[in-house]
Image (cartoon, rainbow, N blue to C red):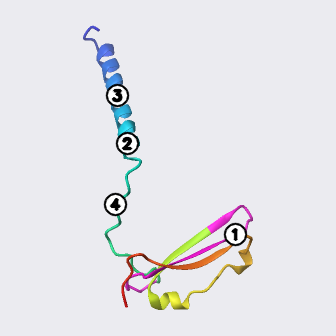
Amino acid sequence: MPDTKAGREEQAHHESKRQRRRDVDEALERGDEVEPPDERPITCHRRGCNEPASFVVRERYQEETGHGAVTAEAFLCRAHTDEESPTNLDGVYDDYVFRVDPLPEGPVD
């Protein structure tokens, strides 16, 4: 291929395609890897509370428009978890969920 502007552009295009292919192959190889844990501590979602979160509260309910389910999650400290209760009971359906789960690395009492 002669050293012309069109030739250089074609070479650059081919190199760009090869690089994208290498990136995709690399990403596919890493697809089985486990994501590293989030190192920062999770704090309570309640406004003004800086306590570490101990629980995750999940509620899955039917959207008001009827177009599907919505899942709401809140990471809360122990005191705010005690105050938590279902809030979307009007959106209850067969797969409704209200669940409180401890965080795996929550603070120990």
Residue at 38 percent of width and 76 percent of height: 42
Q: Quadrant of residue 7?
A: top left
Instruction: Tell me the quarter of the image containing the C terminus.
Output: bottom left
Do callouts 2 and 4 mark residues in contact (Cβ within 8 Å)? Answer: no
Q: Residue furthest left?
A: 3
Looking at the picture, how far across and down is residue 91, in whole percent? 72, 74
Q: Earlier in the sequence, mark 2 or mark 3?
A: 3
Residue at 33 percent of width and 32 percent of height: 19
Mark 4: few, some, or many residues within 10 Å (few <14, many ≥20)?
few
Q: Which residue does the numbered mark 1 point to in the structure image?
A: 95
The residues bearing labels 2 and 3 have C-alpha atoms spaced at a distance of 17 Å
Q: Which residue does the numbered mark 2 point to in the structure image?
A: 29
Q: Amino acid at mark 1?
A: Asp
Q: Earlier in the sequence, mark 1 or mark 4?
A: 4
The residues bearing labels 1 and 2 have C-alpha atoms spaced at a distance of 36 Å
The residues bearing labels 4 and 3 have C-alpha atoms spaced at a distance of 29 Å
Q: From the viewer's side, name the closer residue of 9 and 11.
A: 11
Report the magenta residues as a range.
47-70
Q: Earlier in the sequence, mark 1 or mark 2?
A: 2
Q: Earlier in the sequence, mark 2 or mark 4?
A: 2
Mark 1: few, some, or many residues within 10 Å (few <14, many ≥20)?
few
Which disc, if any, is residue 18?
Answer: 3
Q: Quadrant of residue 16?
A: top left
Instruction: Tell me the quarter of the image containing the N terminus.
Output: top left
Q: Earlier in the sequence, mark 4 or mark 3?
A: 3
Which disc, if any, is residue 36?
Answer: 4
